[in-house]
Image (tube, rainbow, N blue to C red):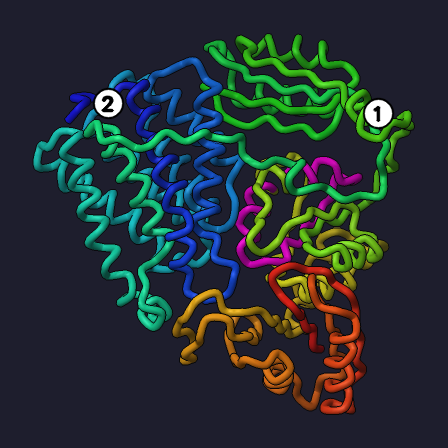
Amino acid sequence: MKYKEITGAVFKEMLIGAVSLLDKNKETLNDLNVFPVPDGDTGTNMSMTMMASIQEVKLSSDETVTSVADAASLGALKGARGNSGVILSQILRGFAKGLKGDIKTMQAEHLALAAEKGVEAAYKAVMKPQEGTILTIARSLSDEANICLKAGDDVLVMLKKMLHGGEEMLKRTPDMLPVLKEAGVVDAGGEGLLVIYRGFLAVLNGEKIEDIVLEAPESVADFDLITGNEDIEFAYCTEFFIKQIKKAVLQKDVDKFRDDLSKIGDSVLVVGDLNLIKVHFHTNHPGQGLENASKLGELSKIKIDNMREQHRKLESAPVLEKQEKQKPIALVAVASGEGLVNIFKDFLVDEVIQGGQTMNPSAQVIAEAIEKAPSQNIIVFPNNKNIIMAAEQAAKMSKKNVHVVPSKSLPQGISGVLAYNPEMAVEYNVTRMKGALDEVKTGQVTYAIRDAKANGHKINEGEIIGIKDSEIVCHDKNITKAVMTLLENMVDEEDGIITIFYGEGVSEKDAKKIADLAEEKFDDCDIELHSGGQPIYSYIFSVE
């Protein structure tokens, strides 16, 4: 091996190698997704999460193993995207916990403990852990590390054996999940985790991984917060790190610092632990925030931007300064497509995050929307099953009272928002909204990006696919036939309303033809037609 020991500097190189290899393999990982629809994004989400992680590592000048692990964990926490990215961020979070203690050189016992803590954190992050997934692979890596530890293997041999054991376990994942066996694939998240470990070993072995330019992870600018208020109350976007935390500082001191920032501004994020703290807030008094922060430790990478100045340059117009009125409850939702975004805004959703399938907003982007929403009581609608975990992670990052209503589709989100009663308490609304999710059935129409077998269907590339509540129910070369077959599978005698949202690239004329056919076929139902403008899905149907 090129390296005989793992120092903090080497560990940093290992992470960079892992990011490089993961980025090169992200499309392969995307293709492992079970459904043949154009939403395969496991590789993309894991890659972007690791990109955010390594960006945080690069910002830190401290190169102990402990500090590198902490920075990697912090970056992944803020940049986690999709379920796979959130679980990966939790693995890194647990990994960092196992490497506490100012470790200069990672030994076998350190790696074994880190892997074990990573598994614990990942399983805790999932409400109903499913074997045959990335969780199983993470546990397999940990089990192999403990076997090596008992055998007296050094850390380099341990890494080799961990990877080998993980690869053997990955081959068995189709036997644990029937849906994988039917599709003839292994678990994409598990494969992604092994790609990271292959990157680790490639660096240690001195194998060449072609250099890549690591771009900064996508931020709020990429997933725009869409609001009706362009006013800027707090002018200065202030960001910095607190390093070399003073020995007398306790977690309660950090919590008080966060509360103090909330009194002089908004969009407050204080993330990290007593080794490294990342601070972000908007204020008119950045000096006051910096002064309070200096009581905790040394300040690094200080960045202060005048948002009013930036806004004037962008809009070529002065910015009005007025305080947005606080509400008892504020709503936050994720949506894609101009029409659907406007529908949520019309239903008085305060912050709409542009995102959805193939463009999952990160936990930090959702956290920014939560902080910007004009209330201390926030209800979040992810509107996509792959965004729920990121929303829950964002809720934990906030000091506000945040509730996540686990809407898995845009129709569910609309149903939940319509159940909102501003006169009632937040807990009542959350219960009412969660109940509303079960009152609507969701249908989606898209196309197959490859030949595949799924849910008993043999699907050819290019065919139109009909999906009912995440399950493929039909496929056809003709979109009209596919649409009508899907609706026949969705509508029953008790249903009274069919709402059609037509997507990007679908003309109003063609959508009207579909609506007319639905009205003729289901004459007992009221048909509503809206331009959703959503990508990926030609049509989204809500049946209730």
Q: Classify 10 Å Cα crowding around label 1: few (below 14), some (14-19), many (20 and above).
A: few
Residue 375 in the image: state x and y as whole percent: 78, 40
Identify the disc placed on residue 480.
none
Judged left or right of residue 263, residue 69 is left
Give amino acid for label 1: Arg
Residue beneath the point at 35% across and 34% down: 95
Residue beneath the point at 54% across and 69% down: 447
Q: Quadrant of the N terminus?
A: top left
Residue situated in front as seen by the camera: 339 or 143: 339
Q: Label 2 vs label 1: CA separation?
A: 49 Å
Residue under pointer 1: 312
Residue 415 in the image: state x and y as whole percent: 73, 66
Give amino acid for label 2: Ile
Question: Which portion, as a residue range, is magenta?
Answer: 367-394
On screen, residue 140 above or below 293: below
Residue under pointer 2: 6
In which quadrant of the rendered view does residue 106 lie?
Answer: top left
Label 1 element class: helix
**Mark 2 or mark 1, earlier in chain:** 2
How many numbered circles are shown?
2
Q: Classify 10 Å Cα crowding around label 2: few (below 14), some (14-19), many (20 and above).
A: some
Residue situated in front as seen by the camera: 413 or 255: 413
Judged left or right of residue 47, residue 533 is right
Q: Would residue 377 be visible to someone looking at this image?
A: yes
Residue beneath the point at 41% across and 31% down: 212
Residue beneath the point at 50% across and 65% down: 37
